[in-house]
Image (spheres, helix red, strand yellow):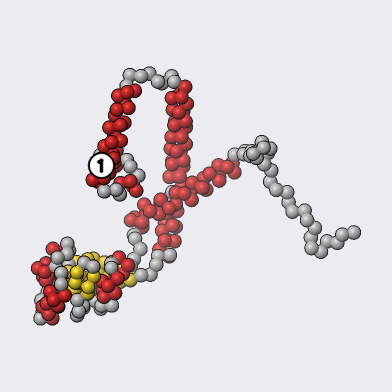
């Protein structure tokens, strides 16, 4: 389990029934190799020593950089990034809707008739819907038009709050009866919730700033592929357009 948790996110997206055998194979191989090397004194081996030194240097650099970046990730800077995020936040509409999903059109039409006779949408959803939201009265919460299949989105976003579809809406899942409860512009995340992804976006920019600061403060000499010092290109010495040749 620890091995799987340490895998990169893209690897953890593999279905567990496929991922587990691969992870188990890797763990078994590692344990077998550990047993082969148990008791061997390789600390003085030149290759081991060199690789340990390289690993130590890499870890030291990584920790130093991480600490330096964190010091620059102030709340003021994060709030500035948040203000920019809010200013650029797209203006899109979202709806809060419920639905009742049934297998055939006649069942959907029967639901609509019962709604017209005064039945409560939530009660019919609990009784008749084959969707997982049935126990919650068909509540889908707020969503964007692009979050749902086109037929469902087209129907939901043309309804006024408090109204329901007068005809069944067909999709790949079956036949829907949809009721819209509310419409609103989608709001940006609150600062505290946006903070993690803002920090992730800022890290690279902060790191580049730090490296540039360190380079400016250091005495850096660069050499080309032939070992010759790299010098700044000379200032443009071409004559001005109005200069005349004698």
Identify the residue at image location x=9%, y=68%.
127
Q: Is residue 147 above or below residue 71?
A: below
Identify the residue at image location x=44%, y=31%.
55
Closer to the camera in the image, 63 or 43: 43
Identify the residue at image location x=26%, y=75%.
155
Looking at the image, residue 141 sits to the left or right of residue 102; the answer is right
Q: Is residue 230 above or below residue 118?
A: above
User: Residue 116 occupies which quadrant of the picture?
Assistant: bottom left
Identify the residue at image location x=11%, y=67%.
126
Image location (x, y in percent) of residue 218? 59, 39
User: Residue 231 occupies which quadrant of the picture?
Assistant: top right
Closer to the camera in the image, 238 or 200: 238
Tag 1's secondary structure? helix
Looking at the image, residue 9 sits to the left or right of residue 243; the answer is left
Closer to the camera in the image, 11 or 127: 11
Closer to the camera in the image, 173 or 63: 173
Image location (x, y in percent) of residue 161? 24, 76
Q: Is residue 157 visible?
A: no
Image location (x, y in percent) of residue 42? 40, 20
Q: Is residue 30 visible?
A: yes
Q: Is residue 78 above or below residue 69?
A: below
Image location (x, y in percent) of residue 224? 65, 40
Give the labeled residue for mark 1: 20
């Amino acid at each position: 389990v620890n091995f799987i948790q340490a895998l990169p996110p893209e690897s953890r997206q593999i279905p567990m029934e496929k991922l587990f055998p691969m992870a188990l194979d890797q763990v078994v191989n590692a344990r077998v190799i550990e047993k082969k090397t148990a008791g061997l004194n390789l600390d003085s081996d030149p290759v081991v020593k060199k690789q340990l030194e390289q690993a130590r240097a890499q870890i030291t650099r990584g920790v130093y950089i991480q600490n330096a970046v964190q010091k620059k990730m102030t709340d003021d800077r994060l709030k500035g990034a948040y203000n920019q995020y809010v200013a650029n936040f797209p203006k899109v509409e979202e709806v809060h809707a419920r639905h009742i999903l049934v297998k055939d059109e006649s069942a959907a039409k029967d639901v609509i008739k019962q709604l017209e006779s005064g039945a409560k949408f939530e009660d019919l959803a609990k009784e008749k819907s084959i969707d997982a939201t049935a126990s919650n009265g068909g509540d889908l919460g707020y969503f964007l038009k692009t979050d749902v299949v086109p037929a469902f989105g087209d129907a939901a976003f043309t309804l006024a709050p408090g109204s329901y579809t007068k005809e069944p809406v067909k999709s790949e899942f079956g036949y829907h009866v949809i009721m819209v409860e509310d419409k609103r512009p989608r709001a940006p995340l609150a600062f505290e919730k946006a903070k993690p992804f803002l920090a992730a976006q800022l890290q690279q920019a902060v790191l580049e700033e730090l490296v540039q600061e360190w380079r400016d403060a250091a005495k850096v000499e660069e050499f080309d592929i032939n070992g010759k010092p790299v010098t700044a290109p000379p200032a443009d010495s071409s004559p001005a357009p109005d200069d005349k040749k004698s």
